[in-house]
Image (cartoon, helix red, strand yellow):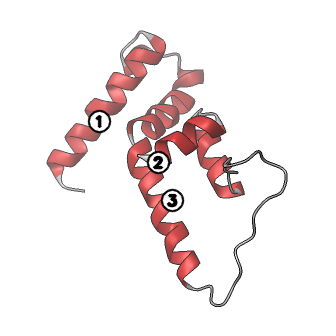
Amino acid sequence: MPPEDARKLRGKIANQINRTYGKVYHEVDLTKLDTALEDAYLLANKDKLIEKSKLEGADSAEGVEGGIPSVPSSPGKGERVLTSEEATVAEKLNLTGEQYLEGKKT
């Protein structure tokens, strides 16, 4: 990673920890620091992670030939359902399924 990008990422993570805990990272309780850093990283990079998930989904869909797309019968009209991978990403980002899907639209 280029030094400038690394510096920006560290700043985003530090800001996210400050917003979440109201402290700078070196003041966070050591028993919570690993979780704090992981959560802050995910939140700081959520846009990149969502984009990466989209690209991975598109790549995996390219390998499928001749398939007929299925329409889930349980959701309401026009409603979309998260895949298991999308649900995992949404959970890691502390987002609801609705919030994750809304983010994918943009």
Crowd rating for badge 3 (residues with CA inside 10 Å; few <14, some 14–19, many 20+): some
Viewer-nearest residue: 65 or 51: 65
Where does the image place residue 100, in percent across and percent down from the top left? 56, 41
| Residue identifier under label 1 | 10
**Residue at horizontal 51%, vertical 26%?**
33
Mark 3 and mark 2 in contact? Answer it, CB < 8 Å. no
Vertical position of residue 49 compared to residue 38: above or below: below
| Residue identifier under label 2 | 105
Mark 1 and mark 2 in contact? Answer it, CB < 8 Å. no
Q: What amino acid is found at the position of numbered circle 2 in the picture?
A: Lys
Viewer-nearest residue: 52 or 19: 52
| Residue identifier under label 3 | 53
Give me the C-alpha separation between circle 1 and circle 2.
28 Å
Vertical position of residue 67 compared to residue 86: above or below: below
Viewer-nearest residue: 63 or 74: 74
Which picture quadrant has residue 51? Answer: bottom left
* Mark with earlier residue (1, 3): 1
Give me the C-alpha separation between circle 1 and circle 3.
22 Å
Q: What amino acid is found at the position of numbered circle 1 in the picture?
A: Arg
For this orientation, the residue located farthest to the top is 22
Viewer-nearest residue: 41 or 99: 99
**Residue at horizontal 51%, vertical 37%?**
38
For this orientation, the residue located farthest to the bottom is 66
**Residue at horizontal 26%, vertical 31%?**
11
Give me the C-alpha separation between circle 3 and circle 2.
13 Å
Badge 2 element: helix
Tell whether 63 sits left or right of 26: right
For this orientation, the residue located farthest to the left is 4
Where does the image place residue 91, in percent across and percent down from the top left? 64, 39
Foreground mark, 1 or 3, reads 3
The quarter of the picture where the N terminus appears is bottom left
Badge 1 element: helix
